[in-house]
Amino acid sequence: MTFSFSFILLTLVLLILSPPSTPSPGWSCLSECVCGQGGQVNCSGGELHFVPRILDPRVQVLLLGHNHIDFLSPGAFALLPRLLSLELQSNGLQRVHVQAFWGLGVLQSLDLSANALQALEPGTFRPLRALHTLSLAGNRLMRLEPMWLGPLPLLQNLSLQDNLLSSMGSGVLDRLPALHELNLQGNPWICDCTILSLCHWLRSHAHQILGAESLMCVSPDQQILKPLAALTEASFNYCALPLTPWDLGIITMLGPLSFLASLAACFIFGSLLTAFRVRRKNRHYPVKRPIPQTVALGDPPENPTTNFPAPACFL
């Protein structure tokens, strides 16, 4: 009896841990969604304002495009650990919480295009270690920083076209070692010192850029309509080189030394100025010395303390 009960319990555990490959439409699908074969759930154009949570955890493809989801909350997809593809294009998405993609360790494709994203919180894509394709096209991003995207060790395709990108932080693309296709078209690039690292990367990876010849500078005046890939190191000779630890040490020491030198200079200058003024004053107003007076023999001395009669002379 004990053996039979243990066998039945083990069978139930195996059934739970080994679910079928397709979702169960009976309890997972919302009225706004269509559940299909192969673990796909299509909720596109369903007037949704939030990510539906009552979904089968076996879903592998989730289509949420063309809704009204303007914010992704923390753990929005935590109930979908097997999700491989996620589409959120054309939602008016304005903000993505830094923990929104937690639990999506096997996600391979993410589409956030045609939204209203202006910035990304550092670490937002950190859980997506298996991501191959990422689209941020058609948003309002003005700048990218290294911690906004990476590291994404398996990312191969990145779409950033039609944003407001004018520059890119140093090292953004260096954190994407598997990248072999990048789209940067349709951005107003400002070719000043902040874009130096991007130009360097473009020259060495020109074959990975879609429409590299169409990436043009919109400013400053001397660089207008010049292709980014054509800008050489000489174009940025006016840019200051990064400071080395030796430079920082010298700058740190020069601060107090210059302060002490300025105090010494002020003291010396003040002393010289004072001496010059005293000398000039003595030249115009010389010190009056007392004039010696001749005393007659018959005159009594002027000192009142020795007022004795003058001695008489006897011949």
Image (cartoon, helix red, strand yellow):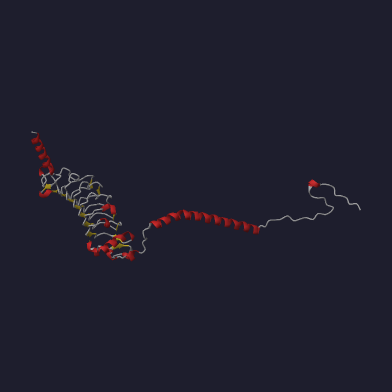
User: On the picture, is 227 further left or further right than 62?
Assistant: right
Question: Farthest residue toward the right?
Answer: 315
**Residue 75 point in image, percent of width and height:** 22, 44
* Residue 260 seen: yes
Is residue 76 placed above or below 188 in the rendered structure?
A: above
* Residue 164 seen: no
**Residue 48 point in image, percent of width and height:** 18, 46
Question: Farthest residue toward the top?
Answer: 1
Residue that appears at 38% across and 56% down: 245
Is residue 85 placed above or below 211 in the rendered structure?
A: above
Residue that appears at 11% across and 49% down: 38
**Residue 166 point in image, percent of width and height:** 29, 58
Of residues 75 and 217, the one nearer the viewer is: 75
Residue that appears at 27% across and 52% down: 148
**Residue 31 point in image, percent of width and height:** 12, 44
Residue 288 occupies quadrant: bottom right
Q: Quadrant of the N terminus?
A: top left
Of residues 286 and 314, the one nearer the viewer is: 314
Counting labels gives 0
User: On the picture, is 1 further left or further right than 144?
Assistant: left
Of residues 125 and 43, the one nearer the viewer is: 125
User: On the picture, is 306 further left or further right than 235?
Assistant: right
